[in-house]
Image (tube, helix red, strand yellow):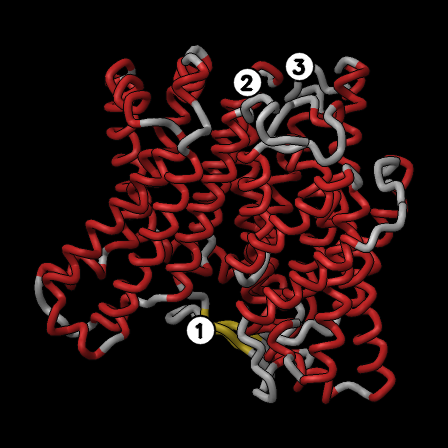
């Protein structure tokens, strides 16, 4: 169980985790800061900061185009590199510098956009902001490959990269043009929503001039972002990537029909979403309609259509070359089944969280549904969890207590402050509030530790090391697998730093004795003591 003897981690999964880290940081910045504070400011720096979101979208378009055009060629070249070119010895240093640069970048962004004193230093601050942004990306890139490998790839694939840049710019320009076409899309959505509402209510209140529609009790206006073009663009990228990655398993040209089929279904589902939102508001729950449902239903629809598209592509003989799942070798199938058993509880938990969040107004009254769904999946897959053998040890409890102290120190407790959770419980009956709290404790101490430890310490910690992860003993780790699995665990939680450190502690719990159940016990101990702290101190923000 030493980090010295293990083989290097497969780079692809390491890169995926690093991509997830970067995307999480981008999401954090976009949610935290608003360039609207620059309105009324003049100067090149205001224009640069104000249009930074467009630059991000352009970069994403170029990267996506490059991977779609020549991703396979780039990957083959990377696979031919010697192991020394992908050494993990410097990954920790690169990630540390990346995190330091990101922290400085976020601080400068806050100063420029939120501090009144920042206006006086906008020109100098913007130059520093650009420098730190380049440092963030540069250190992140060095965590994937050393500089010499990047230079070699760029030279050998200069024509491919040039084509990717050109196609990406064209795709980005087409996206800007599509935004101008939101009106026809929104008008089509408007008439479909009106037809759906008339089926249920008979009478609607609508104005085609400003695209406002609803019932006499509740109505909305279809804004540009509600017309569906963003989801259609996302699904187009997903469909094209899927067609390229699985081209050997699909029948062409009929497989090309999956793209317009998925886009059409998603556009129709967007109209259904708006009609459902109006129906929820009309039924007397306007806060739910404009709160959780409005923010979550679109993502639920996108995920459902994207996954449905993949299922149709693999199951229908019209699209698939080998539609039968039994065509795969038995060993591979057994490995896939075990991977599915270890990941499904966490995926079910995430799906239930999105679903219940769509019908909440800040307080998730449907939280018990998460516990039931995750518990059901865990029970159905119980025969695959032979590695969850239990034996007594005091050490996991000590680790769980240490993580609790760490969590309380790093995450704002908000003791006594107003919170949606406290207000939501106050609106329930005493029996309802007690039932909710019991389910919350059961979920925090049983279903969540089991689901998360199976996914992160049981699967991901070993999967980073080997594609045949189930052949590795429980608790075997490398420095890369330890760090990357903990980073992924931290990204899943509200406090990224506290979550990452907690993931490291739980990985240490399993590595000491090679027992997966030790990580579950440590995790459950932390959550159980946290529940006691929340209920005794009123620190609802920690829940």
463 relative position to 88: left or right: right
The residue closer to the viewer here, 289 or 454, is: 454
251 relative position to 78: left or right: right
Residue 471 horizontal/vertical position (percent): 75, 23
Q: Quadrant of residue 498?
A: bottom right
Q: Quadrant of residue 66?
A: top left
The residue closer to the viewer here, 470 or 429, is: 470
> Residue at label 3?
321
The answer, for residue 390, to whether it is visible in the render is: yes
Mark 2 vs mark 3, CA separation in Å: 10 Å
Residue 169 horizontal/vertical position (percent): 25, 36
Seen in the picture, residue 56 relative to 106 is either above or below; the reply is above
> Residue at label 2?
247
> Residue at label 1?
207
Residue ID at (48%, 30%): 240
Q: Quadrant of the C terminus?
A: bottom right
The answer, for residue 288, to whether it is visible in the render is: no
Q: Answer yes or no: do the residues labelled 2 and 3 have beta carbons within 8 Å?
A: no
Mark 1 vs mark 3, CA separation in Å: 49 Å
SS under mark 1: strand
């Amino acid at each position: 169980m030493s980090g010295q003897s293990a083989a290097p981690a497969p780079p692809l999964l390491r890169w995926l985790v690093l991509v997830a880290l970067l995307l999480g940081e981008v999401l954090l910045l976009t949610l935290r800061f608003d360039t609207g504070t620059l309105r009324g400011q003049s100067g090149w720096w205001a224009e640069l900061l104000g249009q930074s979101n467009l630059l991000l979208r352009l970069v994403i378009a170029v990267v996506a185009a490059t991977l779609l055009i020549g991703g396979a060629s780039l990957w083959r070249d990377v696979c031919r590199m010697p192991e020394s070119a992908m050494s993990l010895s410097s990954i920790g240093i690169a990630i540390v510098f990346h995190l330091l640069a990101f922290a400085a970048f976020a601080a400068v962004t806050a100063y420029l956009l939120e501090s009144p004193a920042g206006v006086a230093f906008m020109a100098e601050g913007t130059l520093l902001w650009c420098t730190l942004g380049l440092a963030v990306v540069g250190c992140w890139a060095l965590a994937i490959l050393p500089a010499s490998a990047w230079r070699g790839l760029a030279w050998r694939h200069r024509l491919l990269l040039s084509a990717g840049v050109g196609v990406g710019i064209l795709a980005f320009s087409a996206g800007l043009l599509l935004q101008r076409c939101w009106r026809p899309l929104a008008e089509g959505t408007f008439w479909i929503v009106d037809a759906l509402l008339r089926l249920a209510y008979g009478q609607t209140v609508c104005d085609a001039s400003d695209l406002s529609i609803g019932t006499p009790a509740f109505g909305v206006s279809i804004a540009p972002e509600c017309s569906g073009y963003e989801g259609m663009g996302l699904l187009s990228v997903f469909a094209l990537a899927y067609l390229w990655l699985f081209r050997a398993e699909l029948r062409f040209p009929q497989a090309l029909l999956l793209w317009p089929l998925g886009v059409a279904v998603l556009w129709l589902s967007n109209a259904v979403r708006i009609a459902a939102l109006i129906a929820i508001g009309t039924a007397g729950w306007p806060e739910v309609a404009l709160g959780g449902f409005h923010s979550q239903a679109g993502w639920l629809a996108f995920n459902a259509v994207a996954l449905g598209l993949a299922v149709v592509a693999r199951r229908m003989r019209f699209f698939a070359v080998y539609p039968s799942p039994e065509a795969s070798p038995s060993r591979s199938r057994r490995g896939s089944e075990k991977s599915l058993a270890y990941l499904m509880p966490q995926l079910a938990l995430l799906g239930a969280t999105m679903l219940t969040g769509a019908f909440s107004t800040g307080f998730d009254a449907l939280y018990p549904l998460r516990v039931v769904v995750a518990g059901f999946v865990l029970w159905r897959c119980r025969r695959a969890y032979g590695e969850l053998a239990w034996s007594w040890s005091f050490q996991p409890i000590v680790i769980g207590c240490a993580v609790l102290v760490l969590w309380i120190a790093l995450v704002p407790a908000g003791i006594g402050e107003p919170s949606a959770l406290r207000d939501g419980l106050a609106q329930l009956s005493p029996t309802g509030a007690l039932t909710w709290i019991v389910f919350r404790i059961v979920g925090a101490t049983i279903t969540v530790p089991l689901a998360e430890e199976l996914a992160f310490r049981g699967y991901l910690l070993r999967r980073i090391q080997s594609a045949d992860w189930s052949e590795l003993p429980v608790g075997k780790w490398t420095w890369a697998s330890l760090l990357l699995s903990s980073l992924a665990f931290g990204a899943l939680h509200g406090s990224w730093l506290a979550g990452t450190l907690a993931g490291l502690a739980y990985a240490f719990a399993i590595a000491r004795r090679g027992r997966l159940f030790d990580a579950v016990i440590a995790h459950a101990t932390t959550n159980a003591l946290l529940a006691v702290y929340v209920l005794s101190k009123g620190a609802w923000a920690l829940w």
